[in-house]
Amino acid sequence: MAPRVPDPALPLRPGPGSVAEQVQYPSPLRFNGALDKFDSEDTTPAIGREFSNVNIVDDLLNAPNSDELIQDLAITSTMPPPSVLNFTSDKFSTVSQRGVVFFRAQDNLTDDLQNEFGVADAQVSTISSLARKKMFRHEKQLNTRRYDSAQWHSDIQFEPAPADYTSLRLTQLPKTGGDTLWASGYELYDRFSPAYQKFFETLTATYSGSGFIAAAKADPENVKIYTEPRGNPLNVGEELSAVHPVVRTNPVTGWKSIYAVGPFPKQINELSPTESEELLKKFYNTILESHDIQVRFKWRNQNDIAIWDNRSAFHTATFDYEGLGERFGHRAVGIGEKPYLDPNSKSRAEAFAEESA
Ligand SMILES: O=C(O)CCC(=O)C(=O)O
Ligand SMILES: [Fe+2]
């Protein structure tokens, strides 16, 4: 999704410290209001927005003000609704604010256009229920993986420059089932007390894609790790491991999100192994226990598409459609910036409190 961040075009603002040590952080983007003419519904107060009558190709990509529209859309995926949080929606932008946005039945959206629309420099890959069974068949034999549950995660966190936006379009749907769920990382951060929040901001975690390394080892013929640069010169080699902050700032909204959730964060570096495990569990369980920070999307039509911001939202698939037909989709994963915590950034709740003051 254009604009890319960090981007020389974005205004930078100085962080704390002496001039010599100063790190420049991106300033959040602002909505330009271009999307306001389209009908949309906030799926829940915390996360999600569905656009009912937008054709991505005709109304956004081929519109004369396409850049403006897409910039607003980028911001949207990160945001909560005015009605609940009492702010004016034209101040900020949509995917980054709402966490995830949905469009129905985009039948004229090709892979190339999905790529152009969703995420610049992205690779379109596929998700397939059949291929998944094949890839993890060794684990099934070992009975180490349950097939009916997926894990909450954010895409490719093990990369030094992990995903910003992912778009997923389903082209083949089971009769029912196979819903996808998203949860808000902004809201997860805001559920903790200021004392805990401050503590979390001192932490980093090691994020590792060891599951992929194990899958490649178990089946070297069919599963290979691509070791050339993967969308960014930082993302190379077969190590699939990176250190990122536990709390990161979304460059588009400027809001803080807890980021250490799911199978990739293995260890919080500043804590003992037991403490690390407990805290990672606490983050994960807070999502599980809080259905009000989640949204569940039912794929209804071929070419329904979801676009989300992996920096501030987590997602999980649902494997409940055995015997109900195959499920197939095209996904484009964009490579974002190296995660950072801007010490001057705000939580979403703080930003809204200030807006309404
Ligand atoms: O299949 C799904 O519902 C989600 C798959 C997923 O995690 C992804 O596309 O990144
Ligand atoms: Fe994913």
Image: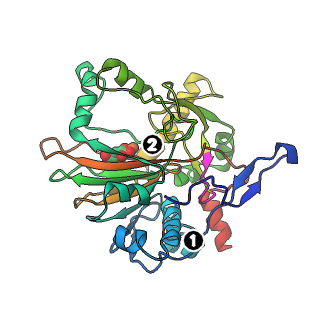
Q: Is mark 2 within 8 Å of ligand 2?
A: yes
Residue 213 screen position, x and y as percent = 41, 24
- Name the residue: 26% across, 35% down: 132
> In terms of secondary structure, what is the magenta stretch mainly?
loop
The answer to whether the residue labelled 1 contacts the one labelled 2, judged by CB atoms less than 8 Å apart, is no
Looking at numbered disc 2 in the image, what kind of residue is underneath it? Asp
Please, what secondary structure does the residue beneath circle 1 have? loop
Question: Mark 2: few, some, or many residues within 10 Å (few <14, many ≥20)?
Answer: many
The numbered mark, 1 or 2, whose residue comes first in the sequence reads 1
Label drawn at residue 31:
1
Please say whether residue 252 is one of the residues in the magenta stretch.
yes
Q: Which residues are magenta?
A: 248-254
Q: Is residue 142 left or right of residue 47?
A: left
- Do we see residue 295 in this rendering? no
Q: Is residue 298 left or right of residue 357?
A: left
Q: Is residue 105 left or right of residue 63?
A: left
Front position in the image: 142 or 129: 129
Q: Is residue 175 above or below residue 224?
A: below
For disc 2, the marked residue is 155
- Name the residue: 31% across, 58% down: 110
Q: Is residue 91 above or below residue 291?
A: below
Residue 188 screen position, x and y as percent = 53, 50
Assign the C terminus to one quadrant of the image.
Answer: bottom right
Q: Quadrant of residue 102?
A: bottom left
- Image quarter for ligand 1: top left
Front position in the image: 43 or 138: 138
Label 1 to label 2, Cα distance in Å?
26 Å
Residue 24 screen position, x and y as percent = 74, 51
Looking at numbered disc 1 in the image, what kind of residue is underneath it? Phe
Residue 184 screen position, x and y as percent = 48, 53
Residue ranking furthest to the left: 323
